[in-house]
Amino acid sequence: MSLPVELPASVAEAFRRICDPSPAALAVVDLAPESTTVVLANRALEELLRAGPLAGRTLAEFTDPEAYLDDVHVRTRLVGGVSKVYERAKRYHRPDGTTVDVHIFGAVLGRESGRQLAFAIFTPADEWLRRGYQATPHLGLVLADIRAALLRGDPEDEVLDLVCQSAGRLVEIENAGILALDEPDVLRLTAVDRGLDDPLIGQRYPVNGASYSEAIDARRTYQYEVRPGALTPFVGQLPESIDVTRPLFIAVTPMLSSGRTLGALIVRRASRAYEPVELEVLETFAQEVGESLALAELREDQERLRMLEVREQIARDIHDEVTQDLIAVRLGLVHLVPRVSDAGLRAEFVRTLDDLDDATRRLRDVVAGLDETTSVADFVDVLRSITSSKAERALIDWDVEVVGPVARLRDDERAELLRVVNEAVSNVVRHAHAERVDVSLTVHDASVVVIVEDDGVGLTAASGRHPGGLANLAARADARRGEYSVTSGAAGGTRLRWAIPLGEVVAVTRDGVGT
């Protein structure tokens, strides 16, 4: 093996004899301000980085360029003799695409062949934490990724997935998940580290009487041991990675913000019980994540409030100015009709007045959709008004049925439902050639469903209607993690179904569609 720095044979042989058998990842490195080059490395380091042989390679190959530049000042001090020891938290990218977080402890050995050599120990982050070293630097590195995702505005499910993945960078675990507190006594699984499409996501669990209830109630971290065989009756419902013949150790730590419980981080492994330092790290991590999520939610609320204020101002301007101007124009035209002697021209005037009335009604419908402060008492009336004004102008029979506790709907949800019905019924009037349209709105325990059915031409090529024709409704459903479908009715016509879960918080864009 050709070494980047010529070492006495006795030194190289001593390193191999002493360090190669060691389970710790060890290396002799050549320090320079611009790079760190491996001179000697034992098998444990090659296994840690999943690369080899390492002699002659720079650590820059395994490091993000920006992170590597951050170490220039450290290496400069070491090369200049200002510092003799160093400690760094790093994330290395392995050749197989995985990453590993390590803590590096090093000491300068001296100069050899004109180069500054150091002896370095590379400790995996989970082992470093397990041995009780200060967790702050590594925890900050992990949290930085989550906060960056929140600042970018990444979708909530992706951020929660990242939280689950990040737990495994702090403590040795097999799986992690997040339980959100939907109601005071109900938790919902919102994320697991097995991916966004895991079938368990969305499952709801009671708090009262559950083994993890003391962690939620006491707002402290607890660990539980599931004895071998206890999960055998549930084999078909468990991930394949769980061996029911072995004990399982579960830790539950609440996610808090300003004393409010948002949910809980739950982790499991079968190797051994969690040590106190690991539980402490998990608790700190969960609390920091809870505060970050709450801060992101506050920013979304502030943006939403700003947009609501803009909408309300637009609604007031339309109602107080534009609508009144249209009414004034209509009154002026009404006085002119009797003066028109030509019967044909008079009929044209009357049709224009009818069109102006239609335009004014449509504008009022728009105002109703913009105003998110529609009261519970007014909501059903406005819903019926939107449907009737459009259907009756087209000589279409109509019916509106509302089922369930409408009072459970938030202001923004009521406004969104009015927009959905407005657009869906407008589409029926324009394209369906229907004789009847039926609108039903049903409020369930955790969702609200709108169904708009007509007896028109259906999804035929000649009608120009197709399931993708109402792209805006699909976007509105997606923004609230809901569902949208347009299908042919059982007896002809078209059936539109639009459903969203209650309580979803969305950021609203300027066109009114959530993101």
Image: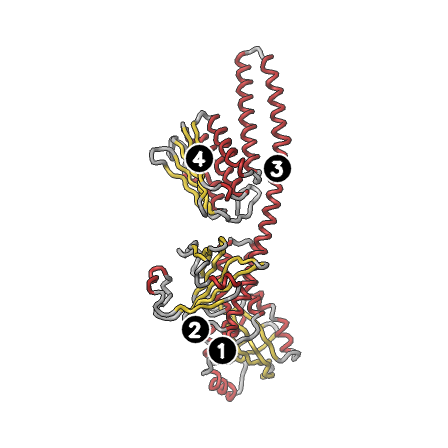
Asked if the residues shown at circle 3 and circle 2 are in contact, with their CB atoms under 8 angstroms apart, the answer is no
**Which is closer to the viewer, label 2 or label 1?**
2
What kind of element bears circle 1?
strand
**Which is closer to the viewer, label 3 or label 2?**
2
Residue, far front: 209
Residue corresponding to mark 1: 25
Residue corresponding to mark 4: 401
**Which is closer to the viewer, label 4 or label 1?**
4
Q: How far apart are marks 1 and 3 (CA)?
A: 65 Å
**First along the sequence among labels 2 and 1:** 1
Q: Which amino acid does label 1 sit on?
A: Ala
Q: Is residue 428 left or right of residue 311?
A: left
**First along the sequence among labels 1 and 3:** 1
Examine the rendered structure and indicate whether residue 453 appears above or below residue 327: below
Examine the rendered structure and indicate whether residue 461 appears above or below residue 66: above
Residue corresponding to mark 2: 272
**Residue visible at 37% across and 62% down in the picture:** 239
Q: What residue type is labelled 4?
A: Glu
Q: How far apart are marks 4 and 1 (CA)?
A: 70 Å
Could you say which quadrant of the image residue 340 lies in? Answer: top right
Q: Which amino acid does label 3 sit on?
A: Ile
Residue corresponding to mark 3: 314
Could you say which quadrant of the image residue 60 lies in? Answer: bottom right
Q: How far apart are marks 3 and 2 (CA)?
A: 61 Å
**Which is closer to the viewer, label 4 or label 3?**
4
What kind of element bears circle 3?
helix
Q: Distance between the residues labelled 2 and 4?
A: 57 Å
Q: Which amino acid does label 2 sit on?
A: Arg
Asked if the residues shown at circle 4 and circle 1 are in contact, with their CB atoms under 8 angstroms apart, the answer is no
Question: Between residues 321 and 371, which one lies in front from this camera angle?
Answer: 371
